[in-house]
Image (tube, helix red, strand yellow):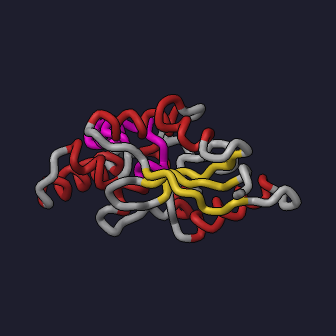
């Protein structure tokens, strides 16, 4: 019989990229709870958006962990492994996402406040060029529809991970090191 202690992932059903890694001491009970009532607000929003379009995250067992091994340590290992692959995870316990504040325009440049709007316009134009509406693009990017809407409206109260995930769809990123002036 397999160990009930395991490390699992939740992946986007469209691009098959891992968006969450967790641990369980109850076999598949814990992973499957995310599909109906997740303990994480970010994961719940993502799952609800997928449900609205008739889909759900893919739940995979990454590893069964024997009793003599450190379950927390194995979870950290898998999270770091995904981060090293530039995966954008929704984990809140070990990965603390950066929140973009209303002062984003000051962080991005010369204080004129136009840089974030340039990013918003870039995303909107590129999305339209590839012929996707906001919902379709959100599905393919693996982010909630509200993230796409907020971004294209030029709102700055977005999670940096969401922004990076959207930009990644076009092969782009933000160089966070340049933001630290």
Q: How many marks?
A: 0
Quarter of the N terminus within the rendering: bottom right
Majority SS type along the magenta span:
helix
In which image quadrant can residue 174 be found? bottom left
Query: x%, y% of residue 114?
Result: 32, 47
Tell me, yes or no, whether the highlighted magenta stretch contains residue 161. Answer: yes
In front: 113, or 48?
Answer: 48
Magenta stretch bounds:
144-163
Residue drawn 69% across the image and 46% down it: 24
| Residue for point 48% across, 64% down | 175
Q: Residue furthest right?
A: 68
Q: Is 120 on the left or on the right of 31, as rendered? A: left
Q: Quadrant of the C terminus?
A: bottom right
Q: Position of residue 40 (x, y in %)?
A: 57, 34
For residue 109, say whether it is visible.
no
Q: Residue at x 79, y 58 (%)?
A: 73
Give the vertical position of 48 relative to 105 (above or below). Answer: above
Q: Residue furthest top?
A: 37
Instruction: Locate residue 110, reporting x and y percent.
Output: 42, 52
Residue 2 horizontal/vertical position (percent):
70, 58
- Displayed quadrant of residue 148: top left
Residue 163 visible = yes
Relative to 47, does residue 129 appear above or below in the rendering? below
Q: Does the magenta-highlighted stretch encompass residue 169? A: no
The residue sitting at 52% across, 29% down in the picture is 37
Residues 112 and 136: in front is: 136
């Amino acid at each position: 019989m397999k160990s009930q202690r395991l490390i699992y992932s939740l992946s986007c059903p469209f691009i098959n990229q891992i968006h969450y890694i967790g641990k369980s001491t109850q076999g598949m009970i814990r992973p499957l709870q995310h599909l109906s009532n997740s303990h994480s607000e970010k994961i719940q929003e993502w799952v609800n958006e997928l449900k609205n379009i008739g889909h759900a995250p893919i739940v995979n067992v990454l590893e069964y962990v024997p009793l003599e091994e450190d379950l927390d340590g194995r979870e950290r290992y898998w999270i770091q492994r995904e981060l090293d692959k530039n995966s954008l995870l929704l984990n809140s316990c070990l990965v603390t996402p950066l929140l973009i504040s209303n002062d984003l325009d000051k962080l991005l440049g010369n204080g004129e406040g136009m840089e974030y709007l340039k990013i918003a316009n870039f995303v909107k134009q590129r999305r339209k060029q590839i012929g996707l509406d906001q919902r379709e693009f959100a599905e393919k990017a693996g982010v909630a529809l509200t993230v796409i809407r907020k971004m294209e409206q030029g709102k700055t109260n977005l999670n940096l991970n969401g922004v990076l995930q959207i930009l990644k769809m076009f092969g782009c990123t933000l160089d966070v090191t340049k933001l630290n002036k």
